[in-house]
Image: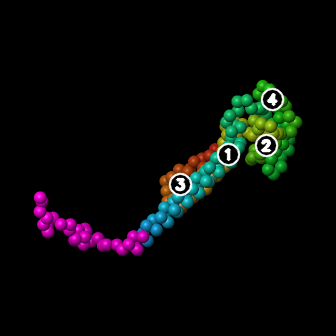
């Protein structure tokens, strides 16, 4: 049987601490935990807001982008602009794809280049008289809401999440997308 001596007993907790450390009270530890939870909550909330902005940008862009990106089986042609209002332009449609029918009146969202007499390559949205610009210019124009969402999310990422490099990347992508869209229209 091993003998128990005073030297093998558990050392006193005050003498077992490292030099310079102070025993914290239970109240202080609970306060530090609560503050940590608040910080974690802030991080989660800011990440949620940034994610919500990006999802909203993709959702808004997808309504037009899907027609531009996946043109197989869709009616493609050329729109000749006859009249433009503040938000949309109207004109006639001349088909280019097989099975597509000419139309006297189609509507397109107004962008910076539509003028009376302009010929714009378009894709018709199914079961509507609405068209979206096709080609590279149409693809970039369709993703403009995502570019704006990237810029807004960059502010949240930099300010709320304190991730400056990630914010610069998001802002750079947003500016590049908006600039490319503007340059191609």
Other residues around mark 3 within 10 Å, as few (<14) / some (14–19) / many (≥20): many
In the rendered structure, which disc, 1 or 2, sits on the residue that comes first in sequence? 1
Please name whichever residue, 85 or 56, is drawn nearer the observer in this view of the structure.
56
Whole-percent x and y of residue 10? 20, 66
Q: Which residue corresponds to mark 2?
A: 108
**Residue 61, disc:** 1
Circle 2: element type: strand
Res 49 → quadrant: bottom right
User: Quick check: marks 1 and 3 in contact, CB under 8 Å?
Assistant: no
Residue position for label 3 = 167
Q: Is residue 183 left or right of residue 160?
A: right
Task: Count the marks.
Answer: 4
Give the structural element (helix, strand or loop) at label 4. loop
User: Residue 93 vs residue 170: left or right?
Assistant: right
Query: Residue 169 in magenta?
Result: no
Do the CB atoms of the residues marked 1 and 4 lie less than 8 Å apart?
Answer: no
Q: CA distance from mark 1 to mark 4?
A: 25 Å
> Can you name the residue that lies furthest to the right here?
104
Q: Quadrant of residue 19?
A: bottom left
Residue hosting label 4: 100
């Amino acid at each position: 049987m091993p003998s128990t001596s005073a030297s093998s007993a558990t050392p006193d907790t005050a003498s077992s601490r490292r030099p310079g450390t102070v025993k914290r009270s239970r109240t202080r530890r609970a306060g530090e935990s609560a503050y940590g939870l608040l910080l974690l909550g802030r991080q989660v909330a800011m990440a949620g807001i940034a994610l919500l902005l990006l999802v909203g940008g993709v959702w808004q862009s997808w309504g037009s982008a899907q027609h531009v990106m996946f043109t197989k089986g869709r009616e493609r042609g050329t729109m000749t602009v006859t009249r433009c209002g503040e938000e949309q332009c109207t004109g006639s449609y001349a088909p280019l794809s097989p099975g597509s029918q000419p139309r006297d009146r189609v509507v397109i969202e107004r962008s910076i280049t539509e003028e009376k007499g302009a010929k714009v390559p378009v894709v018709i949205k199914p079961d509507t008289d609405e068209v979206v610009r096709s080609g590279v210019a149409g693809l970039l124009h369709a993703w403009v809401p995502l570019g704006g969402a990237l810029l807004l999310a960059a502010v949240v990422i930099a300010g709320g999440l304190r991730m400056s490099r990630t914010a610069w990347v998001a802002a750079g992508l947003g500016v590049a997308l908006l600039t490319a869209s503007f340059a191609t229209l």
